Amino acid sequence: MADASGRGLSLPRVLVAGLGSVSALGEDTAQLWDGLLAGRTGIKPVANFRQEHLRNVLAGEIRLSAAQREYAERYRLDSRIALFARLAMDEALKDAGWTRAYLQKKKVGLVLGTSLGMSLVEKSIDQLDECGGEQVDTYDDFAGLVEELADAYRVSSEALIVTTACAAGTNAIGIAKDMIRHEGYEVVLCGGVDTLDRMKYLGHSALNTLTPTLIRPFTPERDGTLFGEGAGILVLERESLAQELPTYAACAGTGYSCDAHHITGPDPSGAGAVKVMGQALEDAGIQAEDVDHINLHGSGTPLNDGMEYAAIRELFGPAAARIPVTSIKPAIGHVMGAAGALEAVATVLSLRDQKIPPTLNVAAPDPELPLNLVCGEARVAALEHALSNSFGFGGCNGALVFSRVNADQWTDP
């Protein structure tokens, strides 16, 4: 079996070279991470769409700063989804030390996850009203978004969009890792982006998956989720390209599955989740006992949290009660197609700093779901391997394993 680097199979190790994010906690990754560790919340009343007929009017909504508005005007970005993606990509590339000119000399890919993309559909409807059907971008397959990004960042090879519901960001990162390991790519920009819209809130109000209060994952009071928006981007690179700048971690393993149990509800047995987590561990060349931390899907719905606990208990056995776990959704909302990407950013930073952010809104964990839930305050822990889970509608599942590398590069964690 290969070790976490993939070397046992003569596969190149894939490193996380740069991080970028935009979220309800801030304009960049530093603000996101500082907010998570401090236990701050970005949840607030929505301001960008009408509130009537909604089960809850709270969300992880991003209020654009003057700098973000100026950026949108400068690059003529007419959708929030394109703006968030560009801001996070700019930060991630700068963090990695890559310039667009240098990327032109490499085999570079782009993989982006999103959910229903209703903001793009609404944009095309507005264009239809204005143009009467002439020269309208329908965004039927969301290709327009990723094509625009590929042009902006001079990505001349594959540019892919992934729409596996709330697993999309995680699946996009996994695909990117596999492109480097198996398809000869040198650098892949990957992650997820999503925006809030009224249709999502109306739909989830009707489904009763929207909490009337706050997200309280893995507690007896959990009664639904709240949504957020933003983007999380990782720059993955082949190890041979590693520069003088520190790399964050190895993207060591990934898993994909679709159990197709129900169009909205998860399989309560957790079979698909067990499969996808097991695939990620095997791909990373590690055992269940090697996992030091799990960044949970942790959406706060009774069914999803129950399923995730059942899967963790099945895969990890007695160790399920030992491994420290957390969910960042109470702080930034469930960012749908970008949720797994932002959670991957948090997982990588946990490995770097050896700290796990707390799960907010937890007075006491549910005794029926006995996990080692980090709550109250951030926890210092010795972390070598961490798992990040994502589970979406239609039984779409994704899991990622990140492993610590070059610990001596980082000082004063």
Image (cartoon, helix red, strand yellow):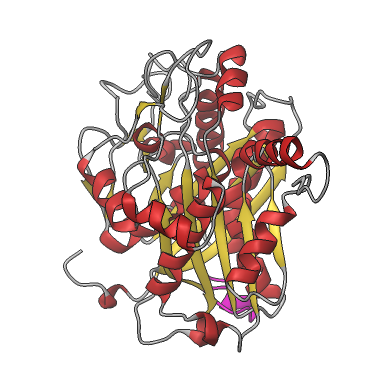
| Outermost right residue | 133
Query: In which quadrant of the rendered view does residue 247 lie?
Result: bottom left
Q: Is residue 216 magenta?
A: no
In the depicted structure, whether residue 217 falls above or below residue 155: above
Q: Main secondary structure of the magenta part?
A: loop
Identify which residue, 251 or 370, lies in the foreground: 251
Q: Residue at x 38, y 14 (%)?
A: 221
Q: Position of residue 50 (x, y in %)?
A: 50, 20
Task: Give the side of residue 242 with respect to residue 263, left or right.
Answer: left
Q: Position of residue 231 (x, y in %)?
A: 48, 50
Q: Residue at x 51, y 14 (%)?
A: 54
Q: Residue at x 26, y 33 (%)?
A: 375
- Is residue 285 in view from this perspective? no
Task: Give the side of residue 163 with respect to residue 77, left or right.
Answer: right
In the depicted structure, whether residue 386 falls above or below residue 3: above
Q: Which residues are magenta?
A: 1-14
